[in-house]
Amino acid sequence: MIDRDKALLITSSVPVEKGFHFFTAIKQPLGIFATSIFEFADQLKKVSLESLEFHLKRNDFARWLRDVIRDDTLANEFEKLQRLELASEKLRGKLVEITEKRCKELAEALKGSSS
């Protein structure tokens, strides 16, 4: 069970400069970014597979989730996924699935504690 304060911290938005900025390669930004875990979940559905593969290979997702969003749980899931070496839409599907699952858990923690 996630405690409400931790859920609030993880679901907070961060400044744009600390957001996750999607690239397809070094010095090749897509101009797409996310400033919260919820935006991140949404952007995973839209960005190119090339970008997803680039960032997963470099461990960028896990690093951002751990260091900026402060969600060790989701960061660990991304690191496990990295070792599976999935490609194409299977990769996107798994990234979206684990991120949306985590977002639901966080939303429940926020909702359940507010009553």
Image: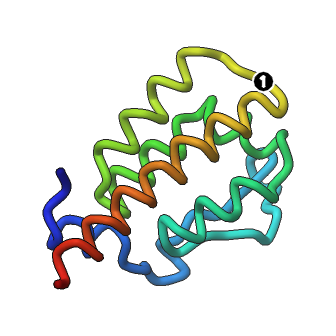
Q: Position of residue 67 (x, y in %)?
A: 33, 55
Q: Position of residue 95 (x, y in %)?
A: 62, 40
In the displayed structure, 111 sits above or below 103; it is: below
Q: Which structural element holds mark 1?
A: loop
Q: In the picture, which quadrant includes the C terminus?
A: bottom left
Q: Give the camera-side residue of 56 and 76.
A: 76
The answer to which of 101 and 56 lies nearer the viewer is 101
- Where is residue 70 drawn, in percent x and y? 29, 58
Quick one: label 1, few (<14), some, or many (20+) residues within 10 Å?
Answer: few
Give above or below for 106 relative to 80: below
Residue that lies at the very extreme toward the top in this rendered image? 84
The answer to whether residue 32 is left or right of residue 50 is left
Q: Is residue 60 left or right of residue 71?
A: right
Judge left or right: residue 110 versus residue 79: left
- Residue at the image point whose x is 66% and y is 70% from the top: 33
Which residue appears farthest toward the front when viewing the image? 115
Task: Give the quarter of the image for residue 12.
Answer: bottom left
- Amino acid type at image mark 1: Ala
Q: Is residue 19 above or below residue 64?
A: below
The answer to whether 15 appears left or right of 7 in the picture is right
Specify the quadrant of the image occupied by residue 31.
Answer: bottom right
The residue shown at (77%, 46%) is 51
**Residue depicted at x 82% and y 63%:** 30
What residue lies at 37% left-to-right and 68% top-to-bottom?
Answer: 107
Task: Name the residue carrying label 1.
Answer: 87
Image colouring: rainbow
Q: Nearer the viewer, residue 93 or 67?
A: 93
Give the number of callouts.
1
- Does residue 108 lie above or below 49 as drawn? below
